[in-house]
Amino acid sequence: MQWLQNPSQNNVDNLNNVRREASRHFKNKKKEYLTDKMEEIEITRKIKNIGGLYWGINYLKKAYQPRTNIIKNEKGYLVTDSHSILARWRNNLFQLLNVH
């Protein structure tokens, strides 16, 4: 907020420092998380739980896949609002399940 109100060089430097610290913090958290996951996988390997081992390896190999919540309404327009999506599913399932 200070930078938006007064974009001086001092405020820009402070903003960059905060961003750098946040980036470093989250990078360390991610490294810690991955280390813990690899230790869990190693434990499952030692107890010879092959299913858990493969599940853990596949979990780590997969990249981030964002969820897309987009459907078409009755008129064919794309809808992204969660309430509209739920209403569309409710109407669709009501029509499918209430057949005489």
Image (tube, helix red, strand yellow):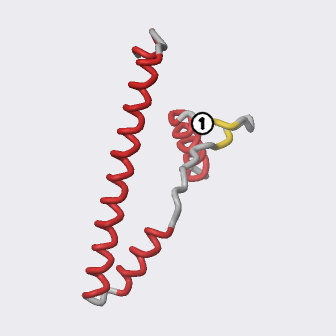
Mark 1, Cα crowd under 10 Å, few <14 / some 14-19 / many 20+, is: some
The residue labelled by disc 1 is 80
Image-quadrant location for residue 24: top left
Q: Is residue 32 left or right of residue 91?
A: left
Q: Tell which of 38 and 10 is nearer to you.
A: 10
What residue appears at the point 51 percent right and 36 percent down from the top-left corner?
A: 82
Task: From the viewer's side, name the closer residue of 80 and 45.
Answer: 45
Residue 9 seen in the figure: yes
Kind of residue at badge 1: Thr
Report the residue at 53% width, 61% height from top. Answer: 63
Q: Is residue 52 above or below residue 8?
A: below
Q: Report x, y in % for residue 2.
A: 40, 14
Q: Quadrant of the N terminus?
A: top left
Q: Residue furthest right?
A: 76
- Residue 2 is left or right of residue 73, and the answer is left
Q: Quadrant of residue 42?
A: bottom left
Residue 24 vertical placement versus 4 (above, below): below
Q: Is residue 74 left or right of residue 89?
A: right
Secondary element type, mark 1: loop
